[in-house]
Image: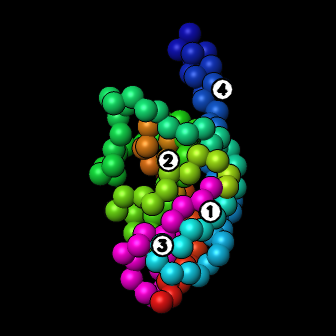
Amino acid sequence: MRGWWMLIAIGCGAEAEAPELLRFELSPGVGTAGTEVTSEVAVQHFQLTGHLDDKDDGHDHDHENGKSKGMTGHVHIYLDDLMTNPVLQQVTEVERFTIPADTEIGEHTIIARLHDATHRIIEPQVTLEVAFEVTE
């Protein structure tokens, strides 16, 4: 009987496809601090559905979480590093946001990372980067 149970357990253990961030683009790719830009993303094996707004939903803005609980959620868009607050929490394929007014002149990296509906980071992390130049 033990061998039969093991066969069923193995047969039911199929894993879902890993979520992917297929495309991340900014338009324009250059502008002054305070410029409004369009962020465009394409995902696969992941559904852009937004986030939960419950106060006790397990938000982890310190990024010290465990594995994600699901394959739905949104894209956090960061300026230069993943440890600061995102400049956008993108819930649709195309959204607009403003480059922060205090952004220094020069080359910057805009980073997109998948998060589940409770803001937990999808593990393994799914990110894409694009360059953005801030001019005078």
SS majority, magenta = strand
Residue sitting at x 48%, y 72%: 34
Disc 2 to disc 3, how far (Cα)? 26 Å
- Residue 73 falls within the magenta-colored stretch: no
- Upstream in sequence: badge 1 or badge 2: 1
In the depicted structure, whether residue 124 falls above or below residue 38: above
In the depicted structure, whether residue 8 falls above or below residue 134: above
Q: Residues within 10 Å of mark 4 (few under 14, many from 20)?
A: few
List x then y, in percent, for residue 5: 57, 16
The residue indicated by pointer 2 is 115
Disc 3 to disc 4, how far (Cα)? 54 Å
- Residue 110 falls within the magenta-colored stretch: yes
Which of 3 and 54 lies nearest the eye of the viewer?
Answer: 54
Callout 1: SS: strand
Callout 4: SS: helix
Disc 3 to disc 1, how far (Cα)? 15 Å
Which mark is in front, 1 or 2?
A: 1
The residue indicated by pointer 4 is 11
List x then y, in percent, for residue 126: 54, 57
What segment is highlighted magenta in the picture?
Answer: 95-112
Residue lying furthest top:
1
Q: Residues within 10 Å of mark 2 (few under 14, many from 20)?
A: many
Contact (CB < 8 A) between labels 1 and 4?
no
* Residue type, mark 1 in image: Ser
Residue sitting at x 56%, y 10%: 1
The residue indicated by pointer 1 is 39
